[in-house]
Image (cartoon, helix red, strand yellow):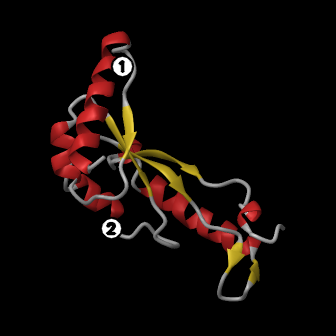
Amino acid sequence: MGLWDAAARLQEVASIIKQHDNAHPVASIFGEFQNLKAVDAKMPSVDVWGVNSYRGISFGGLFDGFAGQVSKPLFLGEYGADAFNAKIGREDQEAQAEATRALTQEILSHSSVTGGVCIGGFVFELADEWWKDGEGS
């Protein structure tokens, strides 16, 4: 299914949700921001946009880029850092904690409570995915 067919289907589903529950916002995750303004225009039943972002130890221009395209609130559906540090070839929980702290602080700095566009985020993930290793952990 292409982008515009997916947007039409999601708009249809969001409209059905609102028919049954107009008291709660409807959210959808959008990858990054390519075509977001156009997609948002075709999906008026979506009240809140989520983004899964893995840009490193900073979100860069994510918040300003989002605010420049749509007026709806944003949440981070996924953000964080893996415990495996590829630069040193081993687990590095201190670096993971620092990245998570820095990213969380950046979310707080762009909070809707203080006039920003972000309503929060979900750290992903709380357990590393060692099971993805073909030889086991």
Label 2's element? loop
Give the quadrant of residue 43: top left
Write the residue at 27% across / 22% down: 15
Mark 2 → mark 1, Cα distance in angstroms: 32 Å
Q: Nearer the viewer, mark 2 or mark 1?
A: 1
Name of the residue lying farthest toward the front? 1
Residue 90, percent from left and from top: 77, 81
Residue 17, percent from left and from top: 36, 19
- In-front residue for pair 67/129: 129
Tell me if I can see residue 71 in this picture. Answer: no
Write the residue at 25% across / 53% down: 67
Tell me if I can see residue 67 in this picture. Answer: yes
Write the residue at 71% across / 70% down: 83
The kind of residue tagged 1 is Ile
Residue 105 lies left or right of residue 17; in this view the side is right
Label 2–label 1 contact, CB within 8 A: no
The residue under label 1 is: 17
Write the residue at 38% across / 35% down: 27
Residue 118, percent from left and from top: 39, 48
- In-front residue for pair 5/19: 5
Name of the residue lying farthest toward the right? 137
Question: Is the residue 53 above or below the residue 119 in the image?
Answer: below
Neighbours of disc 1 within 10 Å: few (<14), some (14-19), many (20+): some
Number of residue marks? 2
Label 1's element? helix
Question: Is the residue 23 above or below the residue 9 in the image?
Answer: above
First in residue order: circle 2 vs circle 1: 1
Residue 126, percent from left and from top: 70, 53
Residue 26 lies left or right of residue 82; in this view the side is left
Neighbours of disc 2 within 10 Å: few (<14), some (14-19), many (20+): few
| The disc label shown at residue 61, or none | 2
